[in-house]
Amino acid sequence: MVKETGTKLVAQNKKARHDYTIHQTYEAGIVLQGTEVKSLRNGHASLVDSFATVDDGEVWLRQATIPEYSHGTWTNHSARRTRKLLLNRKEIDRIERDLGGSGSTLVPLKIYFKDGYAKVEIGVATGKREYDKRQALAERDARRETDRALAARQKGRR
């Protein structure tokens, strides 16, 4: 059997980058059952309303949806079960220290396969206020306008 290389994105939480300011990101392995892996390989997963917690020195992914495998039997998994994330002790300690600040939370950003292994990217984040979101949108629009103006100017010269 040929070993997989590269990355394959399964699910991304686009709303997280809009609603939160991400300070630090971590790549974690995820403990899955057999039918969960098959469902992920088919590209079925959702990170909407999911979050991660640190309990007793372990990191857990909660409320992430990996639907049941369509060809599974009675051994199928529960779609919204709590899943353990695999990080080393230094990373877990650093996350716990970062979460000690007020308003910080642990948000899953994406699920993907890296060299055949299922991974989750989680980020230590703080919530954005409404005016922060408007400011970020205004900055993005201004950057687009300047890029368009530069592109038009370069085309006009040639």
Image (cartoon, rainbow, N blue to C red):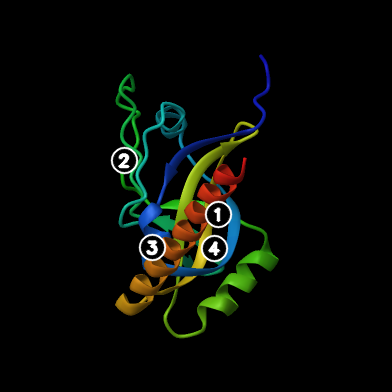
Q: Position of residue 67 (x, y in %)?
A: 31, 36
Task: Kindly indicate the quadrant of the structure image that contains residue 2.
Answer: top right
Task: Report whether 24 appears left or right of 33.
Answer: right
Q: Nearer the viewer, residue 114 or 85?
A: 114
Compared across the picture, whether 3 is left or right of 143 comes to right
Residue 52 in view in this figure? no
Which residue is labeled 3 in the image? 18
Question: Which of the marked residues, 1 or 4, is nearer the chain's N terminus?
Answer: 4
- The reply to whether discs 1 and 2 touch (Cβ–Cβ < 8 Å) is no
Q: Disc 1 to disc 4, how far (Cα)?
A: 50 Å
- Image quadrant assignment for residue 95: bottom right
Residue that appears at 33% across and 23% down: 72
* Nearest the eye: 154 or 138: 154
* Residue labelled with disc 1: 150
Instruction: Identify the residue position indicated by label 2 in the image.
Output: 78
**Mark 3 or mark 2, earlier in chain:** 3
Helix, strand, or loop for circle 4? strand
Identify the mark at residue 19; answer none if there is no mark. none
Q: CA distance from mark 3 to mark 1?
A: 27 Å
Q: Earlier in the sequence, mark 3 or mark 1?
A: 3
Q: Amino acid at mark 3?
A: His
Residue 53 x %, y %: 45, 66
Q: Is residue 93 rendered to the left or right of residue 61?
A: right
Residue 58's disc is 4
